[in-house]
Image: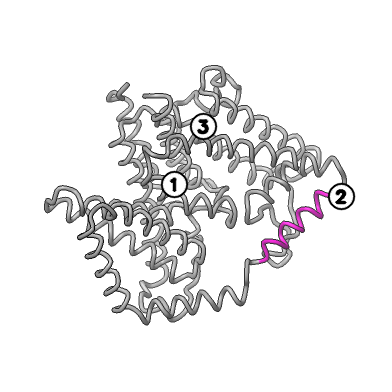
């Protein structure tokens, strides 16, 4: 079923709220400001005013496809489990809300999937374009904050800035998605408009990659480049002449900026030698030590609002860890972690069934999802859930129809 004008209006409101997110908000904002309320309003328009209440009450479970229904049950159950444990342990309301809000973000893919699944493929791609533009806006804001210091790339490591804008999951996504869109437009029917679009998208992708290189985001840069190479190779593999031309152009570009590339590689190697894996193993051991104090804490965690003395940030007592596994083990215990892993496996299985219909989207979101799942706190950010929503919406469209 194709969407009508009312759904189109909701779609544009949602897309504009995503752009506002990239233009004025932050991956982890200091509070709920007018720009965050604007983003939430766009989501509410797309999901419907009663959508969250129907989700939290379980009213939508009966009519949802099995994976979405199971996901809804698991998330609602764990939301209340963490709340009860947090209240039992007497954690502060502010600390509890820092965990509850990200958990609500993780419900967005299940809430939005049926709505996004009704979009035609072209409009779904335009929504992905909006998400990529939001990632580019985060990057441009960081470059402006850094004084447009392009000459520093490969020479010194630039700072993250006040709001850690490059930690957004949308930045690696923009680097890959815009690069693949540029390749697609370049290889499509040659028109001036498509060439201009390809040039603009390619410049946006390069802007994001240079920012990741300038700040030495090791995993983000490597994963983004890997996804880009796979995607571009897929486009060019059946066009041998263009493949050779592209390879020669890439080689020439590397020769031209060889000193910069060598400088980035050297800085990345120095950072790896200096900090290794950023004490991620020590972080997991600290969580295990805390929840291992008694069987009940190990099984059900310490609840929303729990703090841990984290060696990855100088042993400060903080409410976060840098991987989803250690975070959910701390907050929800072994039972909650097992349920979250089961949900992740269930969704991964449905994505695999629909993978052939959205190879470009999966390549573009893969770096951000891997970073958020294993190496970074971005799994708690709204941008991470927005990307998951794009994927689950496309899966819903492929497997369950519009």
Residue under pointer 1: 35
Residue pictured at 41% horizontal, 28% vertical:
115
Q: Is residue 270 left or right of residue 387?
A: right
Q: Residues within 10 Å of mark 3 (few under 14, many from 20)?
A: many
**Res. 358 image quadrant:** top left
Q: Dot 3: what SS?
A: helix
* Sequence-wise first label, 2 or 1: 1
Q: Which mark is residue 293?
A: 2
Q: Which residues are magenta?
A: 279-293
Whether the magenta-drawn stretch holds residue 291 is answered as yes
Alpha-carbon span between mark 1 and mark 3: 24 Å
Q: Give above or below for 109 relative to 158.
A: above
Q: How many marks?
A: 3
Is the image coloured rainbow, by chain, by secondary structure, or in one colour? one colour
Which x, y percent locates residue 348? 53, 39
* Nearer to us: label 2 or label 1: 2
* Nearer to us: label 1 or label 3: 3
Prevalent SS, magenta region: helix
Which x, y percent locates residue 134? 38, 51
* Sequence-wise first label, 3 or 2: 3
Alpha-carbon span between mark 2 and mark 1: 42 Å
Q: Residues within 10 Å of mark 2 (few under 14, many from 20)?
A: few
**Res. 228 image quadrant:** bottom left
Q: Is residue 214 left or right of residue 99?
A: left
Q: Is residue 344 left or right of residue 361?
A: right
Whether tag 3 and tag 2 are in contact, CB under 8 A, the answer is no
Residue under pointer 3: 110
Residue pictured at 68% horizontal, 45% vertical:
328
Q: Which residue occupies the foreground of this view, 250 or 323?
A: 250
Whether the magenta-drawn stretch holds residue 175 is answered as no
């Amino acid at each position: 079923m194709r969407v009508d004008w009312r759904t189109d209006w909701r779609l544009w409101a949602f897309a504009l709220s995503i752009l506002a997110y990239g233009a004025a908000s932050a991956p982890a904002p200091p509070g709920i400001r007018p720009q965050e309320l604007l983003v939430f309003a766009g989501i509410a328009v797309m999901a419907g005013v009663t959508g969250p209440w129907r989700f939290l009450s379980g009213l939508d479970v009966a009519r949802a496809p099995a994976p979405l229904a199971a996901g809804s049950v698991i998330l609602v159950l764990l939301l209340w489990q963490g709340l009860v444990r947090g209240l039992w342990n007497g954690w502060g309301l502010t600390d509890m809300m820092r965990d509850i809000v990200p958990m609500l973000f993780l419900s967005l893919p299940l809430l939005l999937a049926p709505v996004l699944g009704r979009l035609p493929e072209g409009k779904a791609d335009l929504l992905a374009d909006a998400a990529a533009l939001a990632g580019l806006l985060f990057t441009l804001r960081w470059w402006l904050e850094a004084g447009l210091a392009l000459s520093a790339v490969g020479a010194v490591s630039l700072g993250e800035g006040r709001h850690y804008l490059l930690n957004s999951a949308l930045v690696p996504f923009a680097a890959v998605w815009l690069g693949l869109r540029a390749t697609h437009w370049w290889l499509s029917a040659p028109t001036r408009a498509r060439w201009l679009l390809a040039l603009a998208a390619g410049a946006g992708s390069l802007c994001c990659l240079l920012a990741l290189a300038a700040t030495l985001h090791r995993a983000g840069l490597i994963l983004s480049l890997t996804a880009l190479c796979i995607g571009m190779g897929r486009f060019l593999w059946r066009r041998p002449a263009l493949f050779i031309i592209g390879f020669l152009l890439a080689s020439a570009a590397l020769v031209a900026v060889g000193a910069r590339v060598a400088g980035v590689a050297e800085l990345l190697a120095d950072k790896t030698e200096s900090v290794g894996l950023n004490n991620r193993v020590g972080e997991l051991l600290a969580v295990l030590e805390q929840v291992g104090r008694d069987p009940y804490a190990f099984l059900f965690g310490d609840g929303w609002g729990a703090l841990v003395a984290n060696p990855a940030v100088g042993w400060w007592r903080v409410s976060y860890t840098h991987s989803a596994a250690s975070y959910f083990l701390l907050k929800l215990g072994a039972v909650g972690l097992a349920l979250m892993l089961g949900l992740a496996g269930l969704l991964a299985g449905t994505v695999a069934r629909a993978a052939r219909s959205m190879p470009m989207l999966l390549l573009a979101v893969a770096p951000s999802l891997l970073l958020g799942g294993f190496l970074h706190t971005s799994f708690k950010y709204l941008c991470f859930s927005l990307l998951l929503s794009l994927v689950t919406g496309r899966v819903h469209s492929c497997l369950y129809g519009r």
